[in-house]
Image: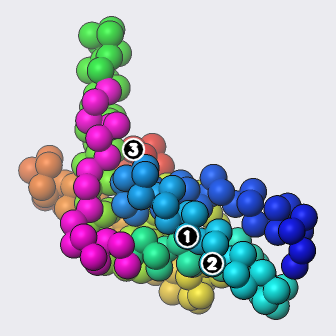
Amino acid sequence: MDVNTFKSVVLPLNRKLYAFAIRFINDTDEAKDIIQEIFIKLWNIRDELEKYNSVEALAMRMTRNLCLDKIKLKKTVPLNPMLQQQVYEDNTKKEAEQEVLIAANRAKKIIEQLEDPQKSIMQLHDIQGYDYDEIAEILNMNINTIRVTLSRARKKVKELLMNKYYNHEKTGNKISFREIL
């Protein structure tokens, strides 16, 4: 792969990779460093990239793995400070928006506590909007396994949200994570 092809195929992935990395580690500087490392690794194997079906899937998998390595080194995941610093002017609007932010922050905290692959699948599908086929390629998993894992992850997050934050037992109320996040 020559320089121009690399620029047109790999470099446009920057935003997706950065957004994916930031979801894992919640540190903008470290996410930028991770993406830079990924681009260097991809550049070093540029001659081999043509044998992959999807360079994007490869880059996402590399990003995920590097993020998980960084998390294992730290053993803690910092909270997203931007969500905690938001302040609103209008009182009624402020209260409604704060409720949404609180719910989103709570859901994100619980999602961050999930084990892989539940965490990865939920972030890719519900937060970043990837479809099942793309997730299957990124995580190298069967689509049915992804569907089942996502369903179980949503159920687990819902139960933890209801029990931990809302003091409810199992109810029939549906929580839409896309609305919360």
For discs 1 and 3, the disc positioned in front in the rendered view: 1
Q: Look at 26% across and 35% down and name the residue there.
A: 84
For disc 2, the neighbor class at 10 Å (few under 14, some 14 to 19, many from 20) is few
Taking 141 as reference, is 67 left or right? left
Depth check: 64 or 70 in front? 70
- What residue sits right under mark 1 in the picture? 37
Q: Look at 75% across and 66% down and name the residue there.
A: 10
Taking 159 as reference, is 169 left or right? left
What percent of the width, then of the height, locates residue 78? 25, 55
Residue 41, label in figure: 2
Quarter-wise, where is residue 104 in the image? Answer: top left
Mark 1 and mark 2: span between their CA atoms? 6 Å
Above or below, comparing residue 175 to residue 17 in the picture: above
Depth check: 118 or 151 in front? 118
N-terminal of the pair, mark 1 or mark 3, is 1
Q: Which residues are magenta?
A: 69-86
The answer to whether any part of residue 111 appears in the image is yes
What percent of the width, then of the height, locates residue 91? 27, 10
N-terminal of the pair, mark 3 or mark 2, is 2
- What residue sits right under mark 3 in the picture? 180
What percent of the width, then of the height, locates residue 175? 36, 51
Mark 1 and mark 3: span between their CA atoms? 32 Å
Q: Verify CB contact (< 8 Å) between mark 1 and mark 3.
A: no
Residue type at tag 1:
Glu
Residue type at tag 3:
Ile
For disc 3, the neighbor class at 10 Å (few under 14, some 14 to 19, many from 20) is some
